[in-house]
Image (cartoon, rainbow, N blue to C red):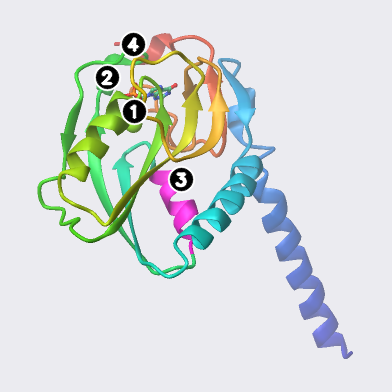
């Protein structure tokens, strides 16, 4: 091996290890915020996405999937999941809003973007961030079923372990969660915290975001 090649190889290894070190986000400023308690790291999410996407790739082996993300909370999940799906797939979105600027209290549910989606004959996989009361996912899935897709499955990042009035449950769940309010990896409090790499428990309603 000549000198140039050795320098190239060492630089390449250095860049790879730097990239690997970066993905665990250990030095992310979020770890200084005492109001946020780390619950699920980005690495654990990524590993679970790989597991679940292998199941999905097998289940849809000879079919094409239409992924439909529920905006905005599922933005990180859909982007990461899609990169591990190896069967043909397209991506669409609908927007649901119930919390808005209410913070930790749910308000009235509004859903938009459904009208111009043609689902007839499609294998739809609906993706949402969190299954809490189940009202959001059940409402959207029920409206989608009326559009006669060939199949309709639902996938969520988190499912809260609570008693529900509905028997409707998501088909794929990445993680079960105690009844906590969480932020990060797409999940928000009043529109904030969506960009955090992992999932964090919000200990108290942040006073500066209450106005
Ligand atoms: P559901 O209709 O009660 O199942 O609530 C689903 C929606 O409420 C989710 O898509 C989130 O936008 C929001 N939500 C419920 N729990 C949380 C939470 O712990 N953190 C952030 N958003 C939440
Ligand atoms: Mg949401």
Q: Is residue 157 left or right of residue 123?
A: right
- Which is nearer the N-term, disc 4 or disc 1? 1
Residue closest to the far bottom? 2
Residue appearing at x 51%, y 61% in the figure: 57
Which label sits in the foreground, 3 or 1?
Answer: 3
**Residue 93 visible in the picture:** yes
Residue appearing at x 35%, y 25% in the figure: 134
Residue 48 versus residue 211 in the image, above or below: below
Which label sits in the foreground, 2 or 4?
Answer: 2
Which label sits in the foreground, 3 or 2?
Answer: 3
Residue placed under numbered mark 3 in the picture: 77
- Which is nearer the N-term, disc 3 or disc 4? 3
Residue placed under numbered mark 1 in the picture: 191
Residue appearing at x 57%, y 36% in the figure: 198
C-alpha gap between disc 3 and disc 2: 22 Å
- Which is nearer the N-term, disc 3 or disc 1? 3
- Near-viewer residue (159 or 12): 159
Please state the horizontal and vertical placement of residue 142, each as a whole percent of the image: 22, 36
C-alpha gap between disc 3 and disc 1: 17 Å
Q: Secondary structure at mark 3?
A: helix
Residue placed under numbered mark 4 in the picture: 210
For the residue carrying disc 1, how many other residues have a C-alpha within 10 Å: few (<14), some (14-19), or many (20+)? Answer: some
C-alpha gap between disc 3 and disc 4: 27 Å
Range shown magenta: 75-85
Residue placed under numbered mark 2 in the picture: 101
């Amino acid at each position: 091996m000549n000198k140039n090649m050795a320098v190239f190889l060492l630089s390449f290894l250095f860049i790879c290890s730097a990239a690997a070190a970066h993905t665990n986000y250990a030095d992310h400023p979020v770890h200084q915020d005492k109001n946020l308690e780390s619950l699920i790291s980005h690495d654990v999410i990524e590993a679970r996405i790989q597991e679940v996407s292998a199941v999905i790739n097998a289940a849809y082996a000879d079919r094409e999937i239409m992924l439909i993300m529920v905006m905005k909370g599922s933005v990180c999940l859909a982007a990461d999941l899609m990169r591990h799906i190896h069967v043909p797939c397209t991506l669409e979105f609908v927007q649901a809003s119930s919390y808005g600027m209410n913070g930790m209290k749910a308000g009235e549910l509004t859903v938009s973007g459904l009208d111009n989606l043609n689902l007839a004959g499609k294998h739809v996989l609906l993706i949402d961030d969190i299954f809490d009361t189940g009202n959001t996912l059940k409402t959207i899935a029920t409206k989608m079923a009326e559009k006669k897709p060939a199949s309709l499955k639902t996938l969520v990042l988190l499912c809260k372990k609570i008693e529900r009035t509905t028997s409707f449950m998501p088909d794929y769940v990445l993680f079960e969660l105690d009844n906590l309010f969480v932020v990060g990896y797409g999940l928000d409090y009043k529109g904030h915290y969506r960009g955090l790499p992992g999932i964090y428990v919000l200990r108290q309603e942040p006073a500066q975001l209450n106005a």
